[in-house]
């Protein structure tokens, strides 16, 4: 702290805000010793209960599931928690409960939690000036707005930068230095601009003051007490967790995280997170700008209810953490409920509308009469959830002629040199190869075939920064069908991400053409996958 005071005096900032927040002493948090017995009795997952016993209509939940099926949204999982008990949960095959799922910007709420814990431990305050943490990374001239930037401005997406710099910053090796060098045309705190690199800076600050990456810092303080196993988090080139994205966690982990916030930081008798921080982190801090031509009344728009500390306010007096394509932890204090969702959608508001229309209205103030018939129908629906297989025929006259024969591929930017298809009654082995090796993918015929792949260009990503090293395998499930006699359609789902690939293989005599369209590109009116169309010839 002394070195930071000296630096502040050097740059003429004074020492305002260096004192510890009252938050640190507002309510004690569990120490390492207190957490040990909690871990011993953690007992795994959240308790389960029937919907009606917790005041939730099974018929209402079933209508929610049916409405999803009628919608254009692709859900991967959901979990409904009422009064601390799971009353409904489901995974659309090939997604499964034990799989992690990429969170995209829902990661931000976990980074905010790490900040709150570090504040409670006296390591920083929201009033600290960002420049004091990175004196060696500052630009030659520190602007007035950069000098005024505080931790709270990073938390509220009001850093004052314009335009949003994340896409450029991740091209650098030193993201901190690139962030601090970016223009700050607005006074911090004056303008809301969603900024994932601002959350990265929070991650960098936590690592600076604790000596640990956020994921490691949170392990004994959050993930272990809540019994959330297998969490991973991507890092920048310098080994700092990406903060604003890159977290991978199970659906039940999301539900537990939301439940912790619903319980104001308390868990099984211990205060893991100060209640004061929960209040500060989830209450209105800044208004998002209103759209020029709103498609719905502002009062019904869940992106216009105010931003908090890396959480969003919702309609119905709820709050949420959310990530691109529909990753949600929705906390409804007035209903004593949490809803966790993983999905891929281009209409995140539409998913929330389903929650408000069906789940919110299904929650009553008192327990409901037993409904064994409704519960049985709900159980059957939840047990039969599956994502659609590729449409088409299971076989083609071409299969016998092509099976086992290799193709030579024309030169391409992916470096793919060759390929092969091997057809069986209930599966197709699709293989591409480059200079480093072969990438076989087994595709089920009429079913999902599990596997993994490190095929170049996979899995699809929204943000390049933090991507695993080339050759890192991804968990997949694949299926294939013949759309026409000469066209094989392959669907590859990356089961720990929201995304999938549609691979279209067209055969014309001895010639082959393979086209990739990832699910993000497919959302565009003019799909344009960055990967080239592969062309090749059958070897005789």
Image: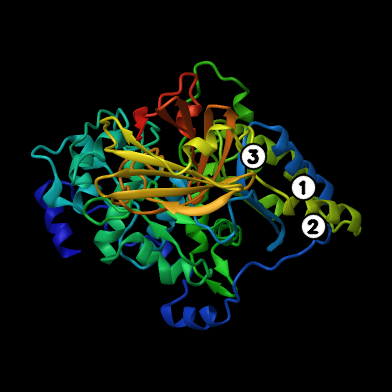
* Element marked by disc 2: loop
Question: In x, y percent, where is residue 133?
Answer: 21, 54
Tell me if label 2 and label 1 are in contact, CB under 8 Å.
Answer: yes
Question: In x, y percent, where is residue 443?
Answer: 53, 46
From the viewer's perspective, tell me whether residue 76 is left or right of residue 154: right
* Element marked by disc 3: loop
Which mark's residue is nearer the viewer, 1 or 3? 3
Q: Residue under circle 3? A: 388
Question: In x, y percent, where is residue 534?
Answer: 36, 30
Sequence order check, earlier mark of 2 and 1: 2
Task: Work out how far the residue at label 2 is from the one at label 3, CA to CA, in angstroms.
Answer: 28 Å
Q: Quadrant of the N terminus?
A: bottom left
Sequence order check, earlier mark of 2 and 3: 2
Residue 42 in which image quadrant: bottom right
Tell me if label 2 and label 3 are in contact, CB under 8 Å.
Answer: no
Q: Residue 51, which numbered label?
A: 2
Note whether residue 43 is visible: yes
Query: Relative to the observer, which residue lies in front, 71 or 228?
Result: 71
At label 3, counting other C-alpha atoms closer than 10 Å, the crowd grade (few under 14, some 14-19, many 20 or more) is: some
Sequence order check, earlier mark of 1 and 3: 1
Q: Residue under circle 1? A: 61
Note whether residue 288 is visible: no
Q: Which residue ends up furthest to the front in the rendered image?
A: 540
From the viewer's perspective, tell me whether residue 257 is left or right of residue 242: right
Q: Residue visible at 14% across and 61% down?
A: 3
Query: Relative to the observer, which residue lies in front, 300 or 220?
Result: 220
Residue 196 in which image quadrant: top left
From the viewer's perspective, tell me whether residue 219 is left or right of residue 139: right
């Amino acid at each position: 702290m002394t070195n930071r005071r000296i630096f502040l005096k050097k740059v003429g900032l004074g020492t305002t805000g260096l004192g510890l927040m009252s938050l640190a002493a507002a309510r004690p948090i569990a120490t390492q010793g207190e957490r040990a017995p909690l871990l011993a009795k953690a007992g795994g997952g959240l308790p389960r209960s029937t919907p009606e016993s917790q005041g939730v209509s099974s018929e209402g939940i079933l209508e929610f599931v049916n409405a999803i099926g009628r919608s254009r949204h692709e859900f991967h999982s959901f979990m409904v928690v009422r009064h601390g008990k799971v009353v409904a949960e489901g995974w659309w095959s090939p997604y499964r409960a034990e799989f992690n799922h990429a969170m995209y910007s829902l990661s931000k709420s976990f980074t905010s939690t790490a900040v709150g814990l570090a504040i409670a431990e006296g390591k920083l305050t929201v009033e600290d000036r960002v420049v004091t943490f990175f004196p060696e990374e500052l630009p030659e001239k520190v602007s007035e707005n950069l000098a005024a930037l505080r931790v709270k401005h990073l938390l509220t997406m009001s850093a004052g930068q314009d335009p949003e710099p994340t896409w450029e910053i991740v091209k650098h090796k030193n993201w901190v230095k690139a962030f601090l060098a970016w223009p700050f045309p607005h006074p911090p705190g004056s303008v809301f601009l969603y900024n994932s690199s601002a959350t990265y800076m929070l991650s960098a600050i936590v690592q600076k003051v604790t000596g640990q990456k956020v994921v490691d810092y949170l392990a004994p303080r959050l993930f272990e007490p809540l019994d959330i196993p297998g969490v991973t988090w991507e890092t920048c080139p310098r080994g700092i967790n990406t903060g604003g994205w890159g977290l991978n966690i199970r659906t039940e982990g999301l539900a537990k995280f939301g439940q912790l916030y619903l319980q104001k930081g308390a868990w099984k008798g211990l205060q893991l997170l100060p209640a004061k921080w929960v209040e500060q982190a989830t209450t209105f801090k800044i208004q998002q700008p209103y759209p020029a031509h709103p498609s719905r009344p502002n009062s019904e728009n869940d992106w216009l209810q105010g931003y908090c500390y890396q959480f969003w306010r919702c309609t119905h007096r709820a709050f949420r953490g959310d990530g691109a394509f529909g990753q949600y932890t929705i906390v409804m204090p007035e209903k004593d409920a949490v809803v966790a969702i993983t999905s891929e959608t281009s209409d995140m508001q539409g998913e929330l509308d389903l929650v408000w229309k069906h789940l919110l209205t299904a929650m009553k103030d008192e327990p409901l009469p037993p409904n064994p018939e409704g519960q049985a129908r709900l159980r059957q629906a939840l047990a039969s959830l599956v994502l659609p297989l590729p449409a088409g025929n299971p076989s083609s006259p071409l299969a016998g002629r092509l099976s086992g024969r290799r193709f030579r591929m024309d030169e391409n930017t992916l470096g793919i040199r060759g390929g092969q298809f091997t057809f069986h009654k209930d599966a197709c082995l699709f293989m591409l190869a480059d200079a480093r090796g072969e990438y076989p993918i087994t595709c089920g015929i009429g079913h999902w075939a599990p596997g993994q792949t490190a095929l170049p260009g996979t899995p699809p990503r929204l943000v390049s920064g933090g991507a695993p090293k080339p050759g890192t395998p991804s968990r997949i499930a694949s299926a294939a069908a013949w759309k026409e006699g000469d066209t094989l359609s392959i669907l590859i789902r990356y089961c720990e991400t929201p995304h999938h690939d549609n691979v279209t293989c067209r055969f014309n005599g001895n010639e082959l053409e393979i086209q990739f369209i990832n699910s993000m590109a497919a959302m565009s009116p003019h799909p344009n996958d960055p990967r080239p169309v592969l062309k090749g010839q059958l070897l005789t």
